[in-house]
Image (cartoon, rainbow, N blue to C red):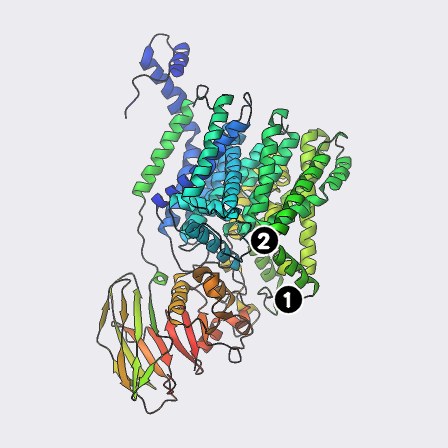
Amino acid sequence: MSIVLLLRILTAAGLVILLPGYLLTQALFPRGIRLDGTQQIALSGAFGIILAILVGTSLIVMQIGLSLSTFLPVVGIISLAASAGAWQRGRLAWSGFRLPPAALFSGVVLILLLVMTTAVFPSKRPLNPAEQFTEFYIDAAGKNIQNAVVIITPSIINHEQTAVTYAVRVEQSGQLLYESDPIYLESEAKWEGDFALSTPDDVTAPLDILLFQTADAEPYRRLSIWIDGEG
Amino acid sequence: MIWPKRLPKRWEEQSSQRLHPGHGEQTAFIAWLRDGAITAVHTHAHIWAFGVLGWLIILVSLRERRAYQDSWVLEDVLPYVLAFCAAFVWVVLRELQASRLTVFASIFVTVLRLIPGLKYKWAYGTAVDQMVHLSTVQSIMQSGFPPANTPYTDIPGMHALLSMIGLVSKTAVDDVVGIAFPIILGLIPFLIYFLTSQLRINSTLRNQIIIVTALAFDPYFLLIQGSPFGVLLITLVLVFFLSREFGSVYYQLPLTIALLGAIMALTFGHGVSSLIFILLIAGMPIALKVGGKIWQLPIKNQIVPGAGRLFTFTAVLFTSWWMYQARGVFSIFVNQIWAFITRAEVEKAPIPSRVSELGIVDLASIFWSLHGNLLIMVLLSGAGVIILWRQRTALSPRFRTLLTTLFVIELGLGTVLIGQLLTGFGNLEYFRLLGYAIVFTPFFAGATLWTIYRKSKMAWTAVLTAIVFVSLFQIFPYQPGIPGGDRLFSHINSDQYLLYLHTVVTDYQKEMLDFVQTHVNPTATIMSDRVTKDEAYRFWGSEQAELYAIRTQAYATADLDEGDWDYLLLHRVGNAGPYSEQVEVRHMAQIDRILSSPHYAVVYNNGESFVLSRR
C-alpha cells in the first residue's frame, strides 16, 4: 500500500460512484432547484451507490458477469443519458459557478501543504521485532525411513527482513545426531534441506530438529518428530 | 509564483468598484490579496491544520503498516490522532456553516475509519463475516460472479460495488475493501445534512446534529462487515423517505425515484439489514399516529400513509426476492429461527466461566471498552429527548414529525435489542443492532449539545472535547483496558486478557495456513481455534477449506487428547493474533503445555504459530 495506491482507489471510487451519481442528480432534479455543494455530494454519492448496486446485481443475476468490459459500458451509457438529460434541463451549465477567492486560495494552500507534508514526512521507520520471523518446518509426513536410514527434509524461509546465516542440528535426548553447514539466506529466500540419519536405537524418544541463528547459542526454532517405523 | 495575466473579470469589477476605479490589474491583484489571500490566512488556518493533521494520520498509518497483532489499533498513531481530534474540536468550535461542518465531520470519521485499512496489511477483522465478504469480492473481481452457496450469492449488491472500485483501481481485494469501505461510509454526515436542509430547523441545533454525526461512531464500523453497509443503505432509504415527505414539492419525483432505488439497493445489498428494516417499519404507521397525537402534530399528516406505502413496497420486494431469487438466504433465516425454537446447541460467545465473580471496577472497564461511546450517545440522546419534548411547541411541525419518526425507529430497535438480549436469538450478535441504532442518535444527542452550547460555549467545548477523546478508547477497542485472567484464575498471568478485542490478521497465521494448504493432505482432519478456522476459510476460500475437516470443539474444551484430529493449528497469544475461546483454555501456560506435550510432534514453527501432528 502506498500513497499512489490510495489515490488510485479514491479516484476509482469517484469514477464509479460520484461521477455517474452527479450526472443522475443533475438529470433528475428540475431546472430551478438550487442544490448547494454539500447537498450535491450527498445526492451524487447516494445515486452513485444505488446505481452501482443495481447495475452490479443485474449483471450477476442475469449471468452476464461483472467485469470492466460489462459494467463500464452500462454505467457509461446511463451516465451519457443522464448528461443529455441534465443538458436538456440546463443543469450542466457552468456559467453560474463562482469560486470565492478565499476558497480558491485556501484550496491551493491546503494542497501545497499536503504535498509538502508528504515530501518531508519520513517514510521509513525502525523494524519492530514482531515483523522479523523465520519459518521452519518439515514435510508434514515428518520423515521417511528407507533401509534403516531416516531421511529428513527441513525447510527454512527467512522473513527476518535481512540476510541471516542459519544452522540446523538434529538431537535426540540431548545427543547430537547431525549438524548442517552454515546456511546463508537472503531476506525472503527459502532453503530446503535433505539429509539422512541412521535410524536411532531408541525410537521412543523424539528427534529434536533445531534451527540456530549462528550468532546465538540457544535454538531459534524447534521441531520434534518421532521415529516409530511408521513413517 | 505565476499570476494570471488577467484576473477573472468579476474580481476586477469588484475590486475596481471598491478601490480605485481604473487601476486595472494591479488594483485587482491587491483586492484579490486582501479579499482572498490575506483574509484566508486568518480565517482558514484551522481548516489547514485540520486537513494537514488528517493527511498526517494517513501517512503515519501507511508508514506503520504491519502484519502482526499490536497492543491496539492506535499504537504508534495515537499522538497524531489526539492532535487530529483537538483540531476537529477547534474547527467545529470556530465554524458556523452547516455545509462546512458536514465536510469536517465526514473527513473526521473517514480518516479515523481508514486507520485500520491503512495500518494493517490484511483487511481488518478475524471473524467469519470478513472471510465471507472478502472471498465474495475476490470471486467477483476474478470471475465476475460471487461464489456459490454463500449468504451473499443472491444478494451481491454491496460486493458488486466494492468489486467495481477494485476493478477500476486494479488493486488487491484487502486494499480496496479496507480503503473504499470507510470512504463510502463517510457519506453518512452528508446524508444527514441533506435531510436537515429539508427542515425548518434552528441553525445552531442543525450544526450540533451534524457535529454529533462524527461522534456517533460504532467500533463495529471499523470492521469489514455487512451491517455498516446495511446501515448506510437504511440511512439512504430513510433520508429519501423523510426528505420526500418534508421536502419541497419540486423534489417529489427525483426523491421518489431515489427512494425506490434505495429500497432495491437495500434488498439486493444486505439481507439482514433489509429484514431488520422491514421489521422496524412494520409498526411505523400506527406508532406514528400515536406519536403524532402525543407530539401534537397536525392531523393532516402525510407521513402516516407514506410510511404504510414504504412498508408495503419494501415488504413485497423483499419477500419476492427472498422467495424466488435469494432462496439461500431464506433457508439460512429459517434455519436460524428453527435453531432458536428448538434451542439447538450453538457456539457460545467467549465469556469466561466465572465472570460473575469479577469486581465492579473490572466489569465497568469491560463495559466501557465494549460500549463506552454508545453509553455517551445514549445519555446524550436521552437528555435530548427530554429537551426536545419540553420545547416541542417551539419546534416546526416538520421537525416534530421527523423526531417522532426517528424516535419510533429507535424505540423499535431498542425493543428488538432487548428482546434479543433476553432470548439470546442470533447467538447474541446484538452489536449489529447497536450499529443501526447509533446512526440516528445525532438528532437527539445534538439537542443536548445545543442546550449546553446556548448556556455556555466554554462548557460546550469541554463536553465535546471530553466526548471526542474519551470515545477514542472505545471506538478503537482498547485492549489494555480489559482485565487480565489473573482476576479470575490464579494460574493465569495478568497479560492474558479475559476477553480479546484484537482483530488483526497476521503474517504468522497466513504463513502457517499456507504451509498447511501446501503440505497437508486434504483428507486430514484439522483441529483449530475459531479464529484460525475463519482465517483458513478466508485465505483458502470456502471450497478448499471445506475439503479439510476443520473442527474447533475439542479446542474450546481443552480436551485435545480425546479429540478426533490429525493436525492441530496453534498460535501463541500475542503477535500472531487473537483467540475467541474462553481464557481458561487458551492462556499461554496452556499453549506451552500443548507445545511441549510428549503426545504431539511439532512439524511447523514460525515462532508464533505452530502445526502439530499426532504421534
- The local crowd at label 2, few if under 14, some if 14 to 19, many if 20 or more residues have their Cα within 10 Å, is many
Q: Residue at x 38, y 33 (%)?
A: A110
| Amino acid identity at mark 2 | His
Where does residue B355 sit, x and y in percent of width and height? 61, 66
> Does residue B305 appear left or right of residue B546 in this picture?
right
Q: Which mark is residue B371?
A: 2
Provide the residue designation for mark 1: B356
- The local crowd at label 1, few if under 14, some if 14 to 19, many if 20 or more residues have their Cα within 10 Å, is few
Indicate the chain on which mark 1 is placed: B
Picture quarter containing residue B120? Answer: bottom left
Is B129 in front, or is B446?
B129
Where does residue B232 sit, x and y in percent of width and height? 56, 43
> Does residue B349 appear left or right of residue B53 in this picture?
right
Above or below: residue B549 compared with residue A45: below
> Does residue A40 appear left or right of residue B419 in this picture?
left
Q: Outermost residue, top direction? A: B22
Above or below: residue B193 compared with residue A219: above
Q: Residue at x 41, y 50 (%)?
A: B175
Q: CA distance from mark 2 to mark 1?
A: 19 Å
> Does residue B384 appear left or right of residue A27 in this picture?
right
Q: Is residue B161 visible?
A: yes
| Amino acid identity at mark 1 | Ser
Where does residue B11 sit, x and y in percent of width and height? 39, 16
Above or below: residue B615 compared with residue B488: below
Q: Outermost residue, bottom direction? A: A201
Q: Secondary structure at mark 2?
A: helix
Quadrant of the rendering where the C terminus of chain B is positioned = bottom left
Quadrant of the rendering where the N terminus of chain B is positioned = top left
Q: Is residue B375 visible?
A: no
Q: Secondary structure at mark 1?
A: helix
Check whether the beta carbons of the residues at disc 2 and disc 1 lie within 8 A of each other.
no
Above or below: residue B384 compared with residue B610: above
